Amino acid sequence: KKVIIMARLSKNVLKLQQKINDILEQDILSRQDKLFVYEHFNEAVLVEVNRCAAFFTPLDLAWEVALEVVDHETPQRVLDLCAGIGMLAFSTLSRNSMAEIVCVEQNPEFVRIGRKLLPEAKWICCSLEDTETLKSLGIFDVVVSNPPYGVVPSMKDVKSSRYTGELAHFKAIDIASNLGNYGVFLIPQSDAGFKLSGVQCYERCISSAHQKFFDETGIEITPSCGIDTTAYTPFKNTKIVTEITTMQFPVDHCFKDDPLVEEQLTLSL
């Protein structure tokens, strides 16, 4: 199946996309094939990136995000929320082959490509509004995500359980807090609560949006192990500076009224 080009792209990008199309038509993909797709796929061929805020994680940065996700000594259960074509899931599984990976993505074309690249994962095509489907997935050890950033038209009607603001990345974190014990999120530096990337030294920097999120959810956003995101390949379709953030989700934020989730939560503890 050929993709439909959604944007005016350079000849080089279109040439790379044609090679990606050829790779995806193969019955079996080698690891090198997958790495090529993950490195060169441009999300602008399928969506209006500014409307959807669909900015795929650069591959080399995804490897570093996975450092915060992976516990090499345990068979983790990991949810990649707003998964795109599975960049973070692929990086996580590459670092921990024992991980059970579930990818949630609302764009069916991204899901189709993701299933071809990462058939080891369980792929769910649904939006963050589909609470019943999300609840049915149970509780995860870690939720990892590079969510949409800012005020996103396509996420205007998405409601989270505690956060009442309009920022998509905070909505995604609040929703994730119901699904896992721990979170690793790539979010805009302006709302991370700190500056670590692209500066000479670490500093705390609390925006009003960050404070609102904390006041309403009680979720404390903390820094990564010291990863400077500006040292890696920039995003293809935005110049935004991001931070790798981590957060411990309170147990009582989970969907404890759901019998299936309650059983899985007990087993995870």
Image (cartoon, rainbow, N blue to C red):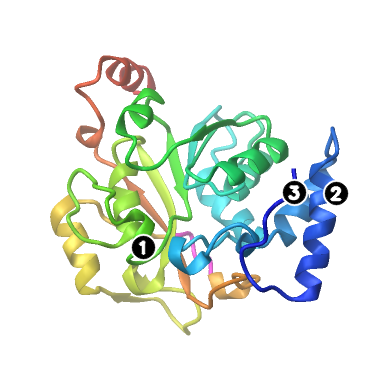
Inter-mark Cα distance, 3 to 1: 27 Å
Query: Vertical placement of 133 versus 176: above or below?
Result: above
Inter-mark Cα distance, 2 to 1: 32 Å
Query: Quick one: label 2 or label 3, which is nearer the N terminus?
Result: 3
Badge 3 vs badge 1, beta-carbon distance below 8 Å: no
Query: Quick one: label 3 or label 1, which is nearer the N terminus?
Result: 3
Asked if residue 268 lies left or right of residue 77, the reply is left
**Foreground of the two, 239 or 52:** 52
Residue type pointed to by label 2: Asp
* Snapshot quadrant of residue 215: bottom left
Secondary-structure class at tag 1: loop
Query: Quick one: label 2 or label 1, which is nearer the N terminus?
Result: 2
| Relative image position of residue 93 (x, y in whole percent) | 64, 38
| Relative image position of residue 120 (x, y in whole percent) | 66, 29
Secondary-structure class at tag 3: loop
Q: Which residues are magenta?
A: 224-228
**Foreground of the two, 257 or 5:** 5
| Relative image position of residue 204 (x, y in whole percent) | 30, 74
Residue type pointed to by label 3: Lys
Prevailing SS of the magenta stretch:
loop
Q: Residue at image x 20%, y 43%?
A: 161
Give the residue at mark 3. 2
Is 137 part of what is drawn in magenta? no
Give the residue at mark 2. 22
Give the residue at mark 1. 152
Inter-mark Cα distance, 2 to 3: 9 Å
Q: Residue at image x 62%, y 70%?
A: 236
| Relative image position of residue 80 (x, y in whole percent) | 50, 42
